[in-house]
Amino acid sequence: MRWIFRTSARSGGGDHDRGLLRLGQCLPFAVLLIGLAIELSPLHTIYTGPLLTGMPAVAALTVGPLGTLSAAVGALAVSVISATLHHSWGDEQVYGNLLGLVVVAVACVTISNVMRTRRQQELDRIRRVSKAAQDALLRPVSPRLGPLRAASIYLAAESGAQIGGDLYEAVQTRFGVRMIVGDVRGKGLPAVRAAAAVLGAFRETVHYERDLAEVVNHCAAAMQRERAAADHDEEYRMECFASALVGQVANGSVVQLVNRGHPAPLMLHQGTVRALGPRAPTPPLGLEDLMTGPPTPTESYTFGPGDRLLLYTDGVAEARNGSGDFFPLPEAMESVHAATPQQFLEELHRRLICHTADSLVDDVAMILIDRFSEGADERGPVAHPGRALDHSR
């Protein structure tokens, strides 16, 4: 398991906040340029000393110790240029202005450094709490599950965050290896509560429910209970749902899948990727009222030695570059040549970050499994002429 910290290119209110921050960062240096322009123009009779003295204090609010020092140096340079051009060095007001500027600069740089240290300490505490919460919610996937090798990766889009609405699990049971990947709508603590409800139901039922569809039904019931418990928040209750994909690999070369509104998993077979999409789309967990057809079917596909199966959240497939192009996940999978599932996911992660210029807008969770025959070389996949069974029960 790997936890990735990153900043993100958020939209909406986030863009507005970043615009205001950049404006605040540029303000003290823009004022310094205005002061310099005044001193070099016929308007030099206007006294700019108090204006320049206050710029280190303004910079300390937005640009940190180094930026504050730069603003102080800039203000000092403008003051020196003004005194030199206008032959004011004998004026006591010039020396008083310079002394005030130095005192304000030293104080502001010191305060800015203290504030930065405290913010970093607070961020470190938040990260430790987030890490503990994430470890309690999402356990690392074992690298070996019966006849399968497995790996997982989680990429947090929020700066300094490690927890969100993405969920995943893979466990070995008496019915075979069972796994889930899901994505709860929304962010923050409400999404975490919903993800915990779904994961709790999955972890409890996978060990005693033989029918995979029944496992999904328990997860759906848990989501419905979560919605009902949030009746005091009408907006959250109406929008509380989660896409989910539940899979099972039992004895034999077959993988069974139940898909509830989730992106179709991708199967890599002999260098070619294809999506294992459901025949009949069904709504996500928590939106059972929208179901008009029969219960969600369990679909089966061949999954033999050498095949690799990727389960992922929409943060992968919907990741865009600066031109608005989606991340070409199938092509990326076909071009990755890695021996182990963990190496495979790490290479996918590297390509995803390159595609988005390290600016994901949504959390990412991925689980990769592959199968090898007993006695085969476990360092890499083995060629296998698998085919889709293409039937449901």
Image: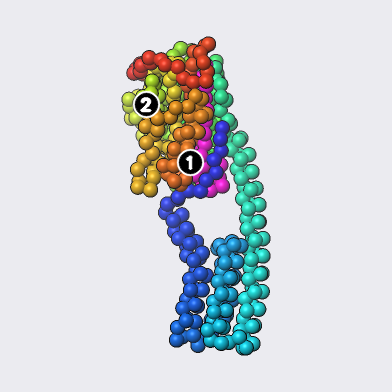
Q: Element type at marker 2?
A: strand
Q: Position of residue 362 (x, y in %)?
A: 45, 43
Label 2 neighbourhood size at 10 Å, few (<14), some (14-19), many (20+)?
some
Residues shaded magenta: 147-168
Q: Position of residue 146 (x, y in %)?
A: 54, 17
User: Where, quadrant-wise, is the C terminus in this rendering?
Assistant: top left
**Residue that label 2 marks:** 273
Q: CA distance from mark 2 to mark 1?
A: 23 Å
Residue at 53% from the left image edge and 48% from the top image edge: 159
Residue at 44% from the left image edge and 23% from the top image edge: 308
Numbered label attached to residue 363: 1
Relative height, residue 81 to residue 63 (above, below): below
Q: Earlier in the sequence, mark 2 or mark 1?
A: 2
The answer to whether residue 257 is visible is yes
Q: Position of residue 374 (x, y in %)?
A: 52, 11
Display colour scheme: rainbow
Residue at 60% from the left image edge and 66% from the top image edge: 69
Of the pair 244 and 302, the residue shown nearer to us: 302
